[in-house]
Amino acid sequence: MGAATVPRRRSLLIARATTKSAEHQEPAAIPADGAHRASGRWRRAVMLFSAAAALTGATTAAISQSARADEERAGGWSDIEDLSDPRVQDIGKWAVSEHNTQTGSNMQFVGVLIGRKQVVAGVNYILTLETKGSRAPLWEASVFDPLPGGGKRQLNSFLPLIR
């Protein structure tokens, strides 16, 4: 079998990347040791690896984004992005008022500094609150806010944070 009769196999990606058509290319010298087959395999392996890496990266990003959304929906804790939201501020103010009612203290609500929430049959909140008129300026409140018609709001804990 002569060098001219050896069929040249190319993948579609390599054939499209070639600037000259097969009819206009000069015949290449084919080494007798089969090195041309190894280089073709190497190119295919590199392209397959590159494609697999691109797919894996996109899939991993989609899976992690989906996992975060599922975690938030299925009872996982998430940071409250907008602490100035009137609902969040209202829950913090309510927690201070409820603590005052339970203990007879007279502290005033200043604002919510940090917040996390957990969606369950309602929403659990853990809020770091700033207050004045008390022995500690920072407090951590745990509040359960049920769905409408599901009962009343509950203050689960209200603990001072030491600075």
Image (spheres, helix red, strand yellow):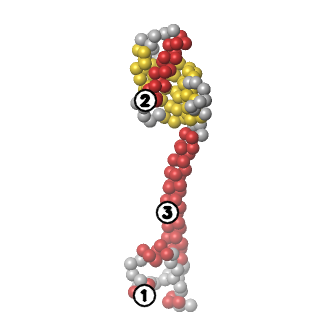
Distance CA(mark 2)–CA(mark 1): 73 Å
Whether residue 61 is situated above or below residue 2 in the rendered picture: above
Element type at mark 3: helix
Mark 3 residue crowding within 10 angstroms, few (<14) / some (14–19) / many (20+): few
In front here: 31 or 17? 17
Distance CA(mark 3)–CA(mark 2): 49 Å
Q: Nearer the viewer, mark 2 or mark 1?
A: 2
In front here: 20 or 89? 89
Report the amino acid beneath label 2: Pro
Seen at 42% across and 11% down, the residue is 133
Q: Residue furthest top?
A: 104
Q: Find residue 47 and report its horizontal and vertical position in percent.
A: 50, 67
Residue receiving disc 3: 50
**Dot 3 or dot 1, earlier in sequence:** 1
Residue receiving disc 2: 86
Residue receiving disc 1: 23
Distance CA(mark 3)–CA(mark 1): 29 Å
Q: Is residue 26 visible?
A: no
